[in-house]
Image: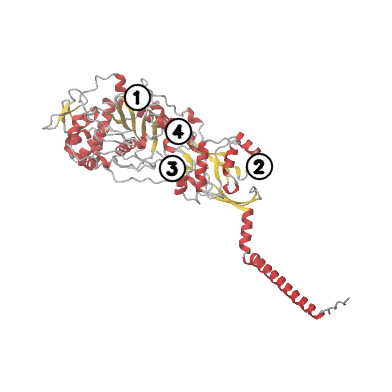
Amino acid sequence: MALRRRSIKDTRGESALFRVRALVGFVLILLGLSALVTRYVYLQVRRHDEFALRSENNRVKPRAIPPARGLIFDRNGVLLADNVPAFRLEVVPEQVPDMKAMLTAIRDVVPLDDDDIDAFKKQLRQNRRFDSVPLKLHLTEDEIARFAINRWRFSGLDVVPYLTRRYPYGSLFAHVVGYVGRIDADDLNRLDADRYKGTSHVGRSGLERSYEDLLHGEPGYELVEVNADGRTQRVLETHPPKPGKNLYLSIDARVQKAATDAFAGRPGSAVAIDPRNGQVMAMVSVPSFDPNLFVNGISRTDYTTYTTDTDKPLLNRALKSAYPPGSTVKPFLALGGLEYGIRRPEDTVLSTGEFCIPGQQRCYRDDTRGGDGTVNMVRAIQKSTNTYFYKLALDMGIDRLANWMGSLGFGKKTGIDLLGEAEGILPSREWKATRSKYGWFPGETIIAGIGQGYWNVTALQLAHATATFAGHGTPYAPRLVMATATVKERPMPLPNPPSGPSLIHKPSDWSVVNQGMEAVITGGTGKGVFTGFPYVVAGKSGTAERFSRRTNDYDTNKNTAYLATRHRAWFIAYTPTDAPRIAVAAMLEAGAWGAQDAGPIVRKVMEAWLAAQGGAVPARNAPEAGSATVPNAPEELEDAPVATPADMPAALPSDSSSAPAPEDGGNP
C-alpha cells in the first residue's frame, strides 16, 4: 500500500486572501452606508421643507367659509329676502374610494332624486377632487339623524351647516327680488372660483341676479386639523368672511300688496314711480310664482306646472312683455305737438266719426259714432278723440313723432336696475326698414297717433313716461335700490340724478296737457274712477284693440263675455297734480275698456300709497269690479320681519318678450 502524500498548509496565502475579502466587504459596507447617509441627507436636509409641508397638509386642511348673503328690505325695513340656517350633505371626492357604489348606498340612508344626482355630477366634473361638493341641500332633521347613525360607512361625506335663502312673502315680490339657485357647471365656468369657494348658490333672477356682486360678499377660510380619516379634530386658525351688502328698496310692501290684490288674479302688470326721483314704489306682474321653490332646486313637477301654465307666471310682464299702448300715448303726442309748434292749445279739429286721407278710399274711425264735433287739445284728450290725433300725427310726420316719443323713453330700455328689460317697439322708418322691403305709408303714421299699429310698450316704459311728464319733463331712470350697506355700516344712498334736462321748454305746454288729463278724470273716459279721492288726479285710459284686418266695423255685435277679454286695457295717472308724488301705469292683458278695467287698479295703488303716507283711505260710493279693501296696515304685513335699528338708517331717502304686432284699426 502506497502511502498518501501529505500537503503542506499555505498559511500565508490564506491570510492574504482573507484580508482581500475583508477589505472588499468593508468597502461594500462603507459604500452602502455612504449611499444611505446620502439619501438621508437628501431627504432630511435638501427636501426637508417640502416633506414638512406635505406632512403638515395631511394634518392641516384649509376649509372655505362662504359669506352670508346680503339681506333685502323694502323702504320701511320690511324683510323681503332672508338667510336661515340649514344643513346639507357634502362629499370630498378624493376621500371616496368608489363614487358609484357610494351614490347607490347613500340613497338608502338619505333620499336623493334624479335632480340631486344630476346637479352633483355636473359640479363633480368642474370641481377639484379635494373640494367639497354638495350632494343634497336642506336636509331634514330625520335625514341628519339617519346619516349620523351610518356615518362610519361613508368616508368623505359629512353634514355641513350653511345659510339658505328664504323669501317671507313668496310670490308677492318674486319678479322684483327674484331668487337664488344652485350653482351649476355653466356658473362654474363664468364665476370667479376663488370668490365662490364654499358657495352653493348664485342669483338667478330679479335683484338677486342684478346685484349679485354686492349681495354675495367675500369668502373666508379656516385651518382645521384632521385625523387619518379626514375628520376635523380642531380649528387652528380662522379668517372670517365679509358678508354681502344689504339692499334697501324704494318699494313699499303695502303698496305692492294692494296692487297685486287689485288684479284679483287677472294677468297684467302695474308700476308706480315717484316722479321726483325715479324711485319705484310698486312693480307688479300677475300671475306670479313662489321663489322659495327654486332655491334648493325646483322639482320637475313644479317646474312643469309653471312652464305649461297658459298665463305664464314666470314671465315678468312689467319688465319684459310689451303691448300696444292705445290711447295712453295721446297726451304725450299732444305735448309733442306743442313743443314742435305744430299745434296751439286753441287749435280745433272737426270730428265727424271718420278721418280720411285725401286720395284714399279707406277711412279711420273715431271711437264715438258721429264723432265728438269740434274739439281743441284739452277736449280731445278728455274725450280721447281719434280724429284729432290722427291729424296731429299726420302733420307731425313719423320722423318727428318717433324722435319725440323716443325722448320720453319709448322704444328703448328705461335704465332700471334690473336685467332683462325689453325695449318694446317705437314705430319709425328705421324700425320698419329693417323688417320690410316696403317704405313707410301715411296710414301707418295715422294709426301710430292713437298708440296702435306697430307700437309695443311695457308697463315700466309707460309708467316712466308718465312719471317724466308728471315731473314737468325731467327724466329719471327708474330705480329699485335706494341704498346699500354692510352689517356694520350705515346705509349709503345710491345717487340717481336726472338723466337729462327737462323735455318741456314752456310751463304752459305742461299745463295744457295736464288740464286735459284732469278733464279725463272729472268728465271724460275716466269719470267716476276717482270719485271721493282727496287729491286731484290726472290720467288717461287706453284700450288697445286686437282688431280684424278684414273689417273696420265696431264690435257691437260681439257678446259681453267676448268684449270683456278681447282688448289690452291700460290706465295711467298721477297725483296730486299741483305737485305730483306718484305716477302709475296699469295694464290688463284681457279687458273690455281701459278706464273700466284698469282704472280701479290704479286707484287701489294710489289709495295704498296715500295710506302709507299716513292719510285716510277715501271711501267710495260703490266697489269696483275686482277691487279689494286695502287697510292702512295690511294684516299680512303687521307681523312682517323688519330691520333692527342697527340694520336700518336713521332716515332713508324720502318720497322728497315683446308681443306680436297688433292688427289694424283701434279704439282709444
Q: For residue 186, what is the image quadrant? A: top left
- Mark 4, secondary structure of its residue: helix
Q: Is residue 115 left or right of residue 176?
A: right
- Labelled pair 4, 3 in contact (Cβ < 8 Å): no
The residue lying at 74 percent from left, 77 percent from top is 20
The residue that disc 1 covers is 532
Tell me the number on the disc at residue 303.
Answer: 4
The residues tagged by marks 2 and 1 sit, at their Cα atoms, a distance apart of 73 Å
Residue 209, disc = 3
Percent from the top left, x then y, of residue 149? 66, 38
Task: Tell me the mark number nearer the camera, choosing from 2 and 1.
Answer: 2
Q: Residue furthest front?
A: 1
Question: Mark 4 or mark 2, which has the lower sequence index?
Answer: 2
Vertical comparison of 623 with 538: above or below: above
- Amino acid carrying label 1: it is Gly
Which residue is most to the bottom?
A: 12
Callout 4, which amino acid? Tyr
SS for callout 1 = loop
**What type is the residue that disc 2 sits on?**
Trp
Q: What residue does disc 2 label?
A: 152
Please tell me in which quadrant of the rendered image residue 58 appears. bottom right
Estimate the spatial distance between the alpha carbons at disc 4 and disc 3, rounded to whole Å.
20 Å
Which of the pair 252/96 is nearer the observer? 96
Kind of residue at badge 3: Arg
Which callout, 4 or 2, points to the residue nearer the camera? 2
| Relative side of 654 to 27, left or right | left
Going from N to C along the chain, the mark reached first, 1 or 4, is 4
